Image (cartoon, grey):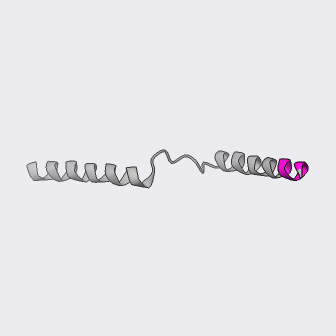
Amino acid sequence: MIICSVSLAIIFLIIFIISAKNGQFEDDESPAVRILLEEKNNEIEEKTEVKK
């Protein structure tokens, strides 16, 4: 059982390292935060368009 669990842990570690090198975890903002930021940007753009 110990050999099985250690080998499974090593497999998961290898998969994690490969996905980290491929840029899987590059997205710093979650979709929920991104929606809030897009709404703020849209509000700012609308205000600047109204002023023109």
Residue at (21% x, 48% y) in the render:
44
Residue at (40% x, 54% y) in the render:
32
* In this rendering, position of residue 52 left or right of residue 21: left
* In this rendering, position of residue 49 left or right of residue 38: left
Residue at (32% x, 51% y) in the render:
36
Q: In the image, is residue 1 part of the stretch drawn in magenta?
A: no
Q: Position of residue 24 (x, y in %)?
A: 60, 51
**Nearest the camera: 8 or 43?**
8
Q: Position of residue 15 (x, y in %)?
A: 73, 51
Q: In the image, is residue 3 part of the stretch drawn in magenta?
A: yes
Residue farthest along the front direction in this orientation: 1
* In this rendering, position of residue 24 left or right of residue 34: right
Residue farthest along the left direction in this orientation: 51
* Observer able to see residue 23: yes
Which region shows up in magenta? 2-7
Q: Where is residue 23 in the image (x, y as percent from the top left)?
A: 60, 48
Q: Overall secondary structure of the magenta stretch?
A: helix
Figure label count? 0
* Observer able to see residue 52: no
* In this rendering, position of residue 50 left or right of residue 45: left
Residue at (90% x, 49% y) in the render:
3
Q: Where is residue 14 in the image (x, y as percent from the top left)?
A: 76, 48
